[in-house]
Structures are given as structure tokens and as C-alpha cells.
């Protein structure tokens, strides 16, 4: 048996941990630059606050009902996610936990007796909530896809299910499948849902009855076959080991407001390169390729909603793999300037909404060789980077940074309603009186 543990309105739950006065009250969390609503509690949903809807449209309802509103606080959410996953690893053992996303994990329950599944699932839910303060739902079933179906049912009526649903028999599985629209099936997107409806398939049970060869032809080959098998209760998707070393590292951000100056673009790209280099060093890697992109803001026609223009990118293969920030910033700035001028000439715009940096061709930095043709001190850049990382980690707020990243950073992302970073900043710890 497999289980999926999914945090309920995770970002909102993380905010509530340090604001107990918000329990059972409407809460929403906004996206980058406070643009859209990306997390909402059930209380906010009942008031008519739409998920992924623009904040400015929901603002009248939010202000009328006193909905607590927060900007995204990724330092807090990342730490709370780690606490939830560590709790699951402690309960089940590291080898039985697959972290699927920041708020979701699959568990292997093959060693749990069938008559104990409900009890164990409830224990997992209560332990996570007691140890971390984050509310979760648990779905248990013979396969990962069916466990997602069970979790969806558990969340749909939290009071009746107590946020736990176990599908341990064929009868329960079939009943759950009949209640699940195809659009709610894990791995079935909006386009595939419409395609299935054209075939007269409206729920998960109907899809599970289709021949495997039909799935191969109409649902993406082997992926379709696996989906149908999983819905029938035949495990076809195993638990994956946690990916500790990334093959590509990217840092991208929306600007706080559209920028037009090349200087601002360069400062942003230099800052994002520094962030990416820090992540690279944390996994003891070195990158042999770097790419930079900028996204222009297109002019809006009357009645047209805002949209981004097509991104303009540039990439380069480095002379040698490196994790040294200064060696990455130099080509990044050259590519930023190139992308900037190319965007202006092609798209006839000087306003930009977003930029990003991607590092790829990553190899272990232990495989790098020093250069015989430079002084020995020139081969010690990694030691300098380690010292810089340690100081910044302990002191925070980029105490040490490269001058090319700028001082004022007027292009920074807006977070006007961000809560304190309670768990990762000494000066923002929660005060108890």
C-alpha cells in the first residue's frame, strides 16, 4: 500500500503556526510581487476568494471580511516543509519516504497490516500536526495514483473524513473512482481531460476500464498504460529516491516593477547568478554552461489582460567548469547585455518584467583540476567562496556581495505583506509574552 501526505493550504498553514489567532479564520497568501492568490484556507474559499485570481480583484472581498493576507515568505515555507518531511522520515524511515513537492510526500506502507492502515494513517496525520503545527491530509491506497484519489476525497470533506481516507478494498476503490472526475486524476491535465470527455470518459472508473493498448495510443504511450494500470490497483510507479544533486540550477524572479535600464537588468542578473552559484556550491558542483534570459513586457491593447512577451535568451559554454561566483558573473553580464539589446531590436520595447539565470552541465567540483599556468593563490577561489558563503549564512542579508549586484536594488520583488521569517532570522524570532 502507498500513502500520500499533503499539507492543507500549506502556505496558509505555515503562517498560522506562528499566528494561532488566525486558526479557523480566512487567510490567503499572494504570489511574487503580490500579484495573485496562490494559497487560501477553506474559510477564504467560502467567502468566494478565487484560487489563482488577481489580488486586486479579490481585494474588496478580502477587506470587507478582514481576510488575513500575506506576501510569499519562502524562507519560512522552506523551513516548515523541511520540518514536515523530517517528521515523516522519523515516523516511517527515510527509505519509505519520497518527497514529491514542497508540501507533499509519498510513503511506502507495505509493512503495515491491512487492519492497521486507518490507525497508522491517523497516527501520521496527528503526529505531523502535533510536531510541526502544519495541518495535513492522508490518502492510502494500493498505488500512488489511487492514493492521490484517496487524498482528494479526504480533503473534499475534512470534517467527515478527519482528513484521512483509506481505500483498502476493491469496493472502496471503485466507489472512489466513480466519484472522481477525469480532470482530478493525477497526471491528467486540462487538455487530456477534454480529450477523454470526447471519448465519453468522464470519471476515473470509466478510464480504468479502458484497454491498455487504448491508453498507449491516446494517453502518451507508456505513460498512458501506467496510468490505467495504477487506476486498476496495479502498482506501476515506484517510490523514487530523493534527488540530492540537481542537473540544472536556475534562479529567476519577477521584478518589483518593470525596468528599462540596462544597469538594472545587469544588477538583477548578477544577483541571480550569485544565488545560483550558492546553490551549486551546496551540492559541491561546478557548472560548464550558463544561460541568461530576459522577459519583455508587451504593450496592452484596450481590454486586453497583461501578458509577458516572449523571452530572449543567450547561452555560453564556459572554458572550464566552475562554481566561483566571479567567474560566472562575468559571462552572465555579457549575455544580459546581449539579450537586452536583442529584445529591444526585436520586440521594440524597453520595459522588462523578469530575468533569470540557469546553470547546467554540472559536474562534481572534486573532478576539477587546478591551472598550472596561474599562481597557486588563483586556484584557491573555492576556499574564498566557502568563506563568503559561511559569513553570509551566519550573518544573513548578503553581508558580503559582489559590487555588480548593486546596492539599492530598486528592481527587487515586492513583498509588502510578508510575515517575519520566524525560523531563520534571529532578529525576527516570535516574541512570547
Image (spheres, rainbow, N blue to C red):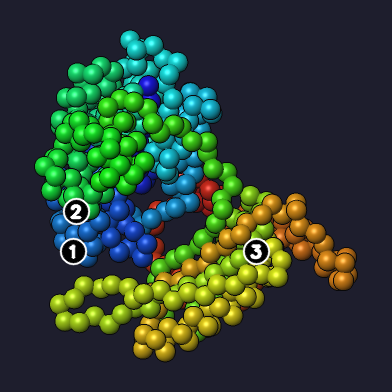
Q: In the rendering, at what x and y percent does residue 356 appear?
A: 48, 68
Q: Is residue 282 visible?
A: yes
Instruction: Tell me the quarter of the picture where residue 100 sits.
Output: top left
Q: Secondary structure at mark 1?
A: helix
The mark lying in front, picked from 3 and 2, is 3
Q: In the rendering, at what x and y percent does residue 272 appear?
A: 54, 67
Q: Is residue 408 visible?
A: no
Q: Is residue 297 above or below residue 80?
A: below
The residue located at (55%, 72%) in the rendering is 315
Q: Is residue 133 left or right of residue 171?
A: right
Question: As rendered, which of 418 and 206 lies closer to the eye?
Answer: 206
Q: Secondary structure at mark 3?
A: strand
Q: Is residue 257 above or below residue 343?
A: above
Rounded to the nearest angstrom, the CA distance separating label 3 from label 2 is 43 Å
Sequence-wise first label, 1 or 2 = 2
The residue located at (87%, 67%) in the rendering is 372
The residue located at (36%, 89%) in the rendering is 348
Instruction: Tell me the quarter of the picture where residue 171 sits.
Output: top left
Q: In the rendering, at what x and y percent does residue 108 appear?
A: 44, 25
Res 57 label: 1
Question: As rendered, which of 430 and 118 lies closer to the eye?
Answer: 118
Rounded to the nearest angstrom, the CA distance separating label 1 from label 3 is 45 Å
Q: Secondary structure at mark 2?
A: loop
Q: In the rendering, at what x and y percent does residue 332 appear?
A: 59, 74
Question: As rendered, which of 421 and 284 lies closer to the eye?
Answer: 284
Rounded to the nearest angstrom, the CA distance separating label 1 from label 2 is 9 Å
Residues at discs 3 and 2 in contact (Cβ within 8 Å): no
Res 129 label: none
Quadrant containing the N terminus is top left
The residue located at (66%, 69%) in the rendering is 318
Dot 2 corresponds to which residue?
50
Dot 3 corresponds to which residue?
288
Amino acid at each position: 500500500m502507498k500513502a500520500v501526505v499533503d499539507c492543507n493550504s500549506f502556505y496558509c498553514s505555515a503562517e498560522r503556526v506562528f499566528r494561532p489567532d488566525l486558526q479557523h479564520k480566512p487567510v490567503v497568501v499572494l504570489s511574487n510581487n503580490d500579484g495573485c492568490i496562490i494559497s487560501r484556507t477553506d474559510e477564504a474559499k467560502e467567502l468566494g476568494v478565487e484560487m489563482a485570481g488577481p489580488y486586486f480583484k479579490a481585494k474588496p472581498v478580502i477587506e470587507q471580511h478582514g481576510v488575513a493576507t500575506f506576501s510569499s515568505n519562502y524562507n519560512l515555507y522552506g523551513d516548515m516543509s523541511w520540518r514536515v518531511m523530517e517528521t515523516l522520515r522519523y515516523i516511517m524511515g527515510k527509505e519509505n519516504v519520497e518527497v514529491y513537492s514542497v508540501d507533499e510526500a509519498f510513503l511506502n506502507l507495505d509493512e503495515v497490516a491491512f487492519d492497521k492502515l486507518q490507525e497508522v494513517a491517523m497516527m501520521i496525520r496527528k503526529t505531523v500536526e502535533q510536531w510541526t503545527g502544519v495541518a495535513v491530509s492522508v490518502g492510502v491506497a494500493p498505488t500512488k495514483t489511487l492514493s492521490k484519489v484517496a487524498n482528494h476525497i479526504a480533503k473534499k470533506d475534512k470534517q467527515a473524513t478527519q482528513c484521512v481516507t483509506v481505500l483498502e478494498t476493491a469496493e472502496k476503490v471503485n466507489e472512489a473512482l466513480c466519484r472522481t472526475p477525469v480532470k482530478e486524476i493525477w497526471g491528467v491535465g486540462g487538455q487530456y481531460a477534454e480529450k477523454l470527455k470526447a471519448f465519453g470518459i468522464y470519471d476515473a472508473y470509466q478510464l480504468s476500464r479502458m484497454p491498455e493498448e487504448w491508453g498507449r495510443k491516446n494517453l502518451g504511450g507508456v505513460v498512458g498504460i501506467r496510468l490505467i494500470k495504477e487506476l486498476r490497483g496495479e502498482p506501476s510507479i515506484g517510490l523514487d529516491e530523493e534527488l540530492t544533486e540537481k542537473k540544472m540550477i536556475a534562479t529567476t524572479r519577477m521584478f518589483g516593477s518593470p525596468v528599462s535600464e540596462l544597469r538594472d537588468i545587469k544588477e538583477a542578473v548578477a544577483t541571480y547568478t550569485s544565488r545560483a552559484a550558492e546553490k551549486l556550491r551546496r551540492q559541491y558542483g561546478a557548472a560548464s554552461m550558463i544561460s541568461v534570459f530576459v522577459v519583455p513586457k508587451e504593450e496592452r491593447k484596450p481590454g486586453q489582460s497583461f501578458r509577458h512577451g516572449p523571452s530572449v535568451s543567450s547561452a555560453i559554454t564556459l572554458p572550464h567548469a566552475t562554481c566561483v561566483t566571479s567567474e560566472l558573473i562575468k559571462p552572465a553580464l555579457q549575455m544580459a547585455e546581449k539579450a537586452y539589446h536583442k529584445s529591444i531590436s526585436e520586440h521594440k520595447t524597453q520595459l522588462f518584467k523578469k530575468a533569470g539565470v540557469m546553470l547546467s552541465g554540472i559536474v562534481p567540483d572534486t573532478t576539477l583540476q587546478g591551472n598550472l599556468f596561474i599562481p597557486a593563490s588563483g586556484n584557491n577561489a573555492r576556499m574564498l567562496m566557502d568563506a563568503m558563503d559561511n559569513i553570509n549564512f551566519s550573518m544573513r542579508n548578503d553581508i558580503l556581495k559582489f559590487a555588480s549586484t548593486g546596492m539599492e536594488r530598486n528592481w527587487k520583488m515586492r513583498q509588502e505583506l510578508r510575515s517575519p521569517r520566524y525560523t531563520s532570522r534571529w532578529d525576527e524570532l516570535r516574541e512570547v509574552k
